[in-house]
Amino acid sequence: MNSRQRVLSALRREPVDRTPVCNPTSVATVELMDLVEAPFPEANRVPELMARLAATSYTELGFDSIMPVFSIIQESSALGCKIQWEQKDNWPTVKMREPIFQDVDDIRIPADFLNHSDTRCVTEAIKILRKEFGNEVAIIGKTMGPWSLGYHCFGVEPFLLMSLDSPGKTKVCLDKLKEATIRFGIAQIEAGADALTLPDHATGDLVSGEYYARYLRDLHIEFAERLRVPIILHICGKTEDRMEFIAQTGMAAFHYDSKNDPVESMRIMRNRTSLVGNINNPETLFSKGPEAVHNEVIKNLQAGVQLVGPECAIPLQTAIENLKQIPKTVKEWHKEKASRNWRG
C-alpha cells in the first residue's frame, strides 16, 4: 500500500499493511520552516509556502499524510475577525477580546468568504500538493466547526455564557455558523483533499459530554453526511465522556488527546469510528526524547488504534528526531509482529 491508500483504508477501518502515521492537525516546526525556507507567518498566507512546509510531513518526517492548515484562524479571518499573525516561533491567533458578533442576528457569512486571501490560500495549497504528489500520499484539509467559530467570533466567555443562558439562541448561532464550516470544507474537497479535519473545540475542560450531545452531535451527523470525504473530528482534552456520542455521528475518525487511555477509548468506540493519536505533545514530544516517544507509540499500537500520531498541533520547537521516531517505531513494531507470526 502507498501512504494514501493506507490512511484512507484506516479511516474506513479496513485492513492495512501497517498502521499509518498521521497528524490531522499540524506537524510544522521552526526547524522544518528553516529547512525549506517557509516560515510563519508567511506560510499561513502564501499558498506556495504553505504547501512547501506542509509537504515536509511526508518528505522529511515520513508520515503518511500531509495537512497544510497549520492554524485554526483561516476562516475566522475570512469572516472578519482580527488576527494577531505573530512570528516564526508562534501560531497566529484570533483577537477574541475584539469580537465581531454581539448577537445571533449579527452573524453573516460574507459573499466573498471563499475568495478571501486566507481561505483561498488553503484551497490553492491543496491544489499544489495534489499536483505534486498525485495519489501518493493522503492530503488532509481542515475546516473549523461552529463551536470553535463561536469562540472566535463572540469570544470564549460570552459564547459559553450564551450556551448556559440561552440554549435556543446558541443552537441558532451554531446553525448559522455551520455554513462556513460546510462551504470551506466543500471548497477543499473540490481542490483535492482526501479527507478533512474538523476541529470543534468543545474541550473536556470547558464542555461536558452532555453538552456535546445537546449542541453538537446532530450537527456532526450533518457534517458527516454533507461533506463527502472521511471526516476526522478533533476535540482536545479528556473526552471519554462523549466518545459514545461521537461514535454515533458517522465521523470517520476521532483525533483524541493523550488525557484519554488508548485501551478504554478503543473499547468505547467499538470499531465504529477510527481513532487517531494520541502521542503527548507538551511532555513527550516537546520535552522528552525518542525513547519516551517510542513507548507511547507502542501503547497505541498494542491497543489497536487505527492511525498513530501526535495528539494535536505540535509545539513549534519540537525536535525533528522525536517526530521521526513515530514512523520508525510503527515500522519496527509491525516488522517484529510479522516476524513472530511467520515463526508461528
Image (cartoon, rainbow, N blue to C red):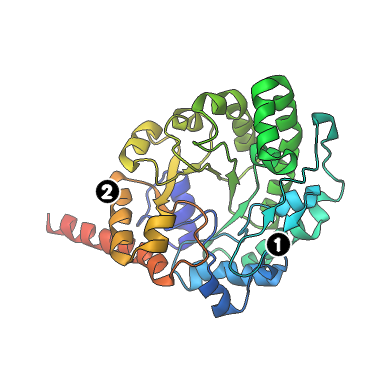
Q: Is residue 244 left or right of residue 197?
A: left
Does dot 1 land on a helix, a strand or a loop? loop
Q: Which residue lies furthest to the left in this view?
A: 344
Q: Which residue lies furthest to the front in this view?
A: 97
Q: Which of marks 2 and 1 is nearer the N terminus?
A: 1
Residue indicated by mark 1 = 85
Residue beneath the point at 39% across and 56% down:
283
Disc 1 residue type (three-letter): Trp
Mark 2 closeness class: few <14, some 14–19, many ≥20 residues within 10 Å = few
* Residue 90 visible within the image: yes
**Dividing the image into 4 quarters, which one contains the C terminus?**
bottom left
Camera-side residue of 91 and 225: 91
What amino acid is found at the position of numbered circle 2 in the picture? Gln
Q: Is residue 329 placed above or below 312 in the rendered structure?
A: below
Can you tell which quarter of the image residue 169 is in? Answer: top right
Q: Is residue 17 left or right of residue 183?
A: left
- 19 with respect to 54 (left or right): left
Q: What residue is shown at x 19% (from left), y 61% (from top)?
A: 339
| Element type at mark 2 | helix
Q: Nearer the viewer, residue 191 or 301?
A: 301
Query: Alpha carbon of mark 2 to alpha carbon of mark 1: how far?
Result: 40 Å
Q: Where is residue 188 in the image (x, y as percent from the top left)?
A: 68, 53
- Would you name the residue on which mark 2 appears? 302
> Looking at the rendering, in which quadrant would you find the N terminus?
bottom left
Residue 276 in the image: above or below residue 169: below
